[in-house]
Image (cartoon, rainbow, N blue to C red):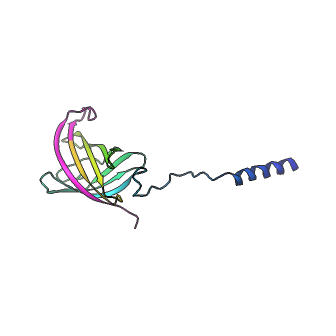
Amino acid sequence: MLKFRLWGVIVLLALACSSPTPLYAQQATVDSRSDFRGATYLITVKTAAGAFESRVVITLHGDRTLSAIDSDQGGPTFFFTSQLGAWREDGKEGVVGRTLDFDYPPNADVARLDYTFTFNADRTKVAGTITLTSFPLQGDPLDGGGTAEGTFTFTGTLVTPR
């Protein structure tokens, strides 16, 4: 019994003397450029001519994945899925990203959207471009080629929890 208590005391002392290790990812601050871990923005997309196209909620996730939902994706003109992809910092305090989505029949295809993002100093505002390229459903959207569908611009605001 004494041996068991002694072992318990040693374990408790070892735990008390060690520094705690967080089991969760540290929250990034929006103004930490070198440690940017992503954010969610509400963006307004415009055509190359400056006409309103849609609103999008886009998330640059901390694991470098990118997801977007578009107000235009459910019709009545277009029917396509949400976008999923990846992003990386561009080395100039901005970000580049690429997503894919699928158009539903009768015009089934796969679309690639190439993004550029620039931010204000505290990363609460974003602006950039989107290049939309379509491919046949069995085509390879990661291998170049495709049909250029348009270039768009966007501006947006950081989504915060109040």
Please indicate whether residue 47 sits to the left or right of residue 117 in the image: left
Percent of width and height locating residue 19: 64, 52
Give x and y (percent) for residue 112.
Answer: 25, 41
Q: Is residue 137 above or below residue 62?
A: above
**Residue 152 painted magenta:** yes
Out of 33 and 18, give the one closest to the viewer. Answer: 33
Instruction: Name the residue located 25 percent from the left edge and 44 percent from the top edge.
Output: 113
Residue appearing at x 45%, y 55% in the figure: 28
Residue at horizontal 16%, vertical 43%?
Answer: 149
Is residue 62 found left or right of 58 in the rendered image?
A: right
In reply to whether residue 119 is colored magenta, the answer given is: no
Residue 1 visible within the image: no
Q: Most extreme residue toward the right, as rendered?
A: 2
For the C terminus, give its image quadrant: bottom left
Tell me, yes or no, if residue 38 can be seen here: yes
Q: Does 133 appear above or below 17?
A: above
Q: Residue furthest bottom?
A: 162
Residue 10: % across, % down: 78, 49
Image quarter of residue 50: bottom left
Q: How many marks?
A: 0
Please give the name of the residue rendered at 38% of the width and 63% of the height, measured from the top-left corner. 160
- In the displayed structure, 140 sits above or below 88; it is above
Location of residue 43 by image quarter: bottom left
Place of residue 104 in the rendered image (x, y in percent of width and height, measured from the top left)? 23, 44
Furthest toward the left, the residue is 49
Name the side, left or right, on which 53 lies relative to 34: left
Q: Which residues are magenta?
A: 133-162
